[in-house]
Structures are given as structure tokens and as C-alpha cells.
Image: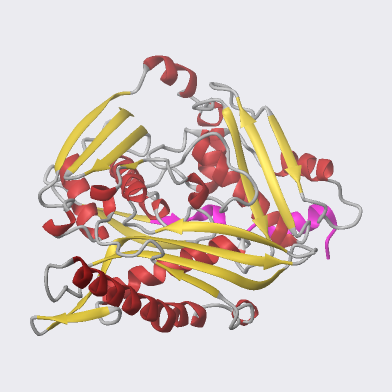
Amino acid sequence: MSYLFTSESVSEGHPDKVADQISDTLLDEFLARDSESHVAVETLCTTGQVVVAGEVSSRAYVDIHTSVRDLIKKIGYNRGAYRFDGDSLGILSAIHEQSSDIDRGVSRGERLEQGAGDQGMMFGYAVDETDNYMPLTLDLSHLILRELAEIRREGKEMSYYRKGKLKTYLRPDAKSQVTVEYDDNRIPVRVNTIVVSTSHDEFILPLDETEQAQKRADEEMLKVIREDVENVLLPRVIAKLPEKVRALFDDKLILHVNPTGKFVLGGPHADTGLTGRKIIVDTYGGRGAHGGGAFSGKDPSKVDRSAAYACRYIAKNMVAAGVAREMLVQVSYAIGVAEPVNIFVDTYGTAREGVSDAMIADKIKEMFDLRPGAIEEMLKLRNPIYRETAAYGHMGREPRTVVKKFESRYDSVPLEREVELFTWEKTDRVDEVKKAFGIA
């Protein structure tokens, strides 16, 4: 029998994602100036206020206030009406130096002997149902919100006229959810349900101050937003999909748009944001598994982050090579110890004939050095590459090389760094994997 599975995503303007982006922006600022920085920064966002706290060991000095304000304005919180805007919010910094007890176990003279920054288990997952080896439910959820953000920045569609000017009614805070129907072989057969909730301006005003007039105005706004999601947003999303995924959309699709009604109050004013609260959005949308820690704000000595990226890298290359259609990889560590405690593999019965999960785990141990220092070198993680990960998922993204600029009033000249983003999404070990498993 067929079954339904659901994943969700949240936009870059969601309060928790604002917090994640602040933490990762500050991490990048430190790494751009001192690649050996050890950073663990947590952020809280609420009405008119940002609090950053954590531990840092670095030779660099970062202008925290300016970095936070610039990021928040770039996300789209640039109006007083949001009650959370980059120009006027208050910023409290409670960052202090990293514990010497932790540093003693992690920092060693030889990088490859560097101990794990904490104990814990980490997972990586890949499945062949999409071109980027991600679960379709999560891939679609992310794409919906990326496209919604693009429409908001363009300011041409999903808009209204006020005082003779065309203006988008979209605000930065939004959520999506996608439910897909699968057959007995875990193959997607159709998109069943899509939920889109987006914050918006109050662009239709009531004719008078009565409750009935307000209700009519709210209903008219919701009708416009629903029609725009149906006729503008979803067609733009579907047009970007490969043909095999487009074929999964039919006229039976269930669509919910702002199901609670008006969504004018959004962002950190309406809902306090915290770093690390959207870990399932960050990884695999509930498919596979997630380890015990979040990612954002942590430098790569924290295996919560670096080893999770390495596990995704391994799983993706294994599935891309045809070792299995679906794969979960787990590693675990003891704090201060370089070698992982274990390597575990689950292919959910999809491994090629004659290949066992235990055999795959043994091959992974032979082929991939999973000591924290080796992971940092393999995936080039001691670079300022993390702000881009903090919205729309850490996995399934397009690896690319970019030049990033870092400016501060404390730097005599702007810093430019050429970096590779999302290195763990490369499939550059496929040929090696095929050879190891005798795959033609």
C-alpha cells in the first residue's frame, strides 16, 4: 500500500533562522580573519532585541554590532513596522573566551591528531529520488521558500499599489510543508499536499472600524494571497523542476495557504528565535536521522557540524555510485579523541546484490579518514563558508566557488576570501567508490 510522508521548511526570515544566520555570520567573520578560530555562538532574537552569547578563542576582532545589523537588513527586516529592524534594534553581546578545559582536549600540535570537540553521534543520509540525492519532500519545501524570497526581492509579483507605487506585500517570515505519496517501493508517485504560510503587509484595509469590515478585509487579503500562491508562486516553482518531478503534480493537489488567516505580525516580534531550533529543516526533513547537536555558530572542530557534513558526503557518493538507492551513515565520537568510536550504515534493504551494510561500513573506514582534523582538510572547513548554510538547508545545495568580502571599520582594507561552498555536496569520490565495490 502507498503511504504519505511530510517535510517542512522555513524561510530566512523565520525567527529561528534569523538566529542561525547571525551565529554563522559571526563565525564567518572570525574565520575570515583567523582560520584557526574556535567559535561556539548562540543567538536569541525577540522584539527589538538580539542577544549573542558563547565562547570564542581567536586572534581576530569582529565588529559584532555592525555584522548583526547588516545581516538583518539583508534578510529583509528593514522597516520599523516589523518591530525588529536592523537600524533600531538593541544588541547585547555576552561572548567570552573558550574554556581552557575544552581547548586542552581539542587543540593539539598536529592537526590530524586534533581531538573531537565533544562527544556525540552524527548522521548523513542520501536517497536517489532527486537529482541532488535529497528527500523530495524537503527539496520541494526549500524550493518553495527560496522562490518566495526571490519574488519578495523582485517586488513585481505578489504585490499591490499604494500611493501610486507598486510594492510587494510579502514579508520575510514564511513556512512551507510538502506531503508526498510513496508506493510500496519507497518511490514518490505524486505530490499530495502543499502548505504555504507567509507573513504579509496589511494591504487591504477595512472600510470602517467595525468587526465585520475587518473580517471582510482579511478574507479579501487571504483570497489574493491564495490566488498568487496558486498562479504565481507554484508555477514558478514547478517550472524549475526536472520533468520527472513535474509529472508528480496533478489536479488533486491539496493546497493550504495561510490556514490560520491573517499573518501580519511575524518574525522575531511575534515569535522569539533561537539558534539550533530547526535542525530537521537543516538536514533531511525527518528522513534518515539527526544527531544530538545543531550546526550553526559552531566552528568545524565541533563534530556536531563537521562529522555530519562528512557523513552526508560519504552517503551521497555511495548512493551516486550505485552502492545503494538509499543510505544512512552514522559516526560517533568521544570528546578529545580523534578516531571515531563507531561507523554504522543502514541501506534500508536497498544495497546492490552481494553487498551488506557491514561491508559498506568497513569500506568507509578504509576509504575515508574521519578524524576531525582530517575532515576539516578533506572538506576545506576552516574557511568562512557558513552563513550560506544557515537558511534553506545545509544539505542538497549546489557546491560552488565564490569570492566573499568582509568589511569592518576595524580593518584597514576590506578582506576578500575565495572559498568553496558546500564541499560536502560534491560527488568527486564516485569513481573511487565504484572501484572499491567492483561497480562497472
Residue drawn at x 35%, y 57% as measured from the top left: 12
In this view, the residue farthest toward the left is 163
* In magenta segment, residue 439: yes
> Is 348 above or below relative to 133?
above
In this view, the residue farthest toward the top is 101
* Front residue of this view, candidates 16 and 114: 16
Name the colour scheme.
Answer: secondary structure
Task: From the top left corner, tell me how far across and down residue 218 is, in percent.
Answer: 27, 70
> Is 150 above or below relative to 310?
below
* Front residue of this view, candidates 133 and 245: 245
Quadrant location of residue 426?
Answer: bottom right
Instruction: Assign the N terminus to one quadrant of the image.
Output: bottom right
- Count of picture labels: 0
* Front residue of this view, candidates 329 and 159: 159
Task: From the top left corner, tell me how far across and down residue 236 is, in percent.
Answer: 44, 81
Left or right: 60 with respect to 4? Answer: left
Which residue range is magenta in the image? 419-440
* In magenta segment, residue 434: yes
Left or right: 65 with respect to 400? Answer: left
In this view, the residue farthest toward the right is 354
Left or right: 155 with respect to 11? Answer: left
Task: From the top left corner, tell me how far across and down residue 364 is, in percent.
Answer: 73, 43
Residue drawn at x 38%, y 66% as measured from the top left: 258
Left or right: 234 with respect to 113? Answer: left
Instruction: Assign the C terminus to one quadrant of the image.
Output: bottom right
Residue 427 visible in the current orientation: no
Task: From the top left corner, tell me how far across and down residue 78 is, in percent.
Answer: 16, 59
* Front residue of this view, candidates 130 and 3: 3
> Is 31 above or below relative to 341?
below
Residue 266 visible in the current orientation: yes
